Image: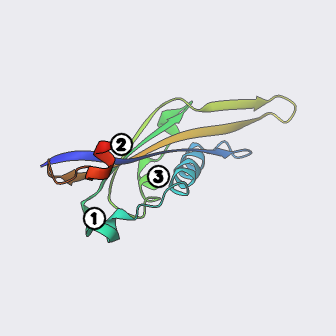
Amino acid sequence: MAEKRIILELGTGNDLYGGDYTKAACRAVQDALHHSSIVLFRSLGYDHRDMRVQVTIGVQEPDKVDAALVAAELPRGKAEVTVVFGGLNVHDPEQDTTHVVATAAVAAFLPIEAGEWRLSEAHEAG
C-alpha cells in the first residue's frame, strides 16, 4: 500500500524577546495547524492514528530546537520532526535582543490503496 500526501500546511512562529528557538518552532506548527481541518477521517472512515505527519522546521540555529517538544504539538498521527537551517533572526542592537522567526511545513500522509480514489464522471468530463 502506497503512502499519499493528503495535506501540506505552512506556518510561521516567533519568539520576540526570549530567543527561544523551540518556542518559535512550536508556534510555527500551531500556525500551520490552524490553517487546516482534515474532515476526511470522519467522512471516509480513516483512523487518524494511521497518519504519518512529517514536520520540517526552519530556524537559524537548528541545534537549539527540541524536536520532541515540537512533535508534542501535533494532536494526531505519528510525528517525525526534522529541523533545518532556515527561518530568520532579526537583531535589535538598541535592546541587544534577537527576535527568532521559525517556519514550519507540516505534511500528512496516509496509506491509500491505488485505485481506491478516483474523480467522479462529472469531474472527468469537465
Q: Position of residue 124 (x, y in %)?
A: 28, 44
Label 2 belongs to which residue?
A: 126
Of discs 3 and 2, which sits in the foreground?
A: 2
Of discs 3 and 1, which sits in the foreground?
A: 1
* Closest to the observer, 41 or 96: 41
Rounded to the nearest whole Å, what is the CA distance between mark 3 and mark 2? 43 Å
Rounded to the nearest whole Å, what is the CA distance between mark 2 and mark 1? 35 Å
Instruction: Name the residue rendered at 70%, 46% in the picture.
Output: 18
Residue 94, quarter of the rendered image: top right
Q: Is residue 46 left or right of residue 107?
A: left
Specify the quadrant that holds the C terminus: top left
Q: Position of residue 11 (x, y in %)?
A: 56, 45
Label 1 sits on a secondary structure element that is: helix
* Residue type pointed to by label 1: Arg
Q: Earlier in the sequence, mark 3 or mark 1?
A: 1
Q: Residue furthest left?
A: 1
Label 3 sits on a secondary structure element that is: helix
The answer to whether 95 is drawn above or below residue 76 in the figure is: above
**Contact (Cβ within 8 Å) of mark 2 with mark 1:** no
Q: Earlier in the sequence, mark 2 or mark 1?
A: 1
Q: Is residue 99 left or right of residue 114?
A: right
- The total of numbered circles placed on residues is 3
Label 3 belongs to which residue?
A: 70
Instruction: Name the residue rendered at 55%, 39% in the picture.
Output: 103
* Residue type pointed to by label 2: Gly
Label 1 belongs to which residue?
A: 49
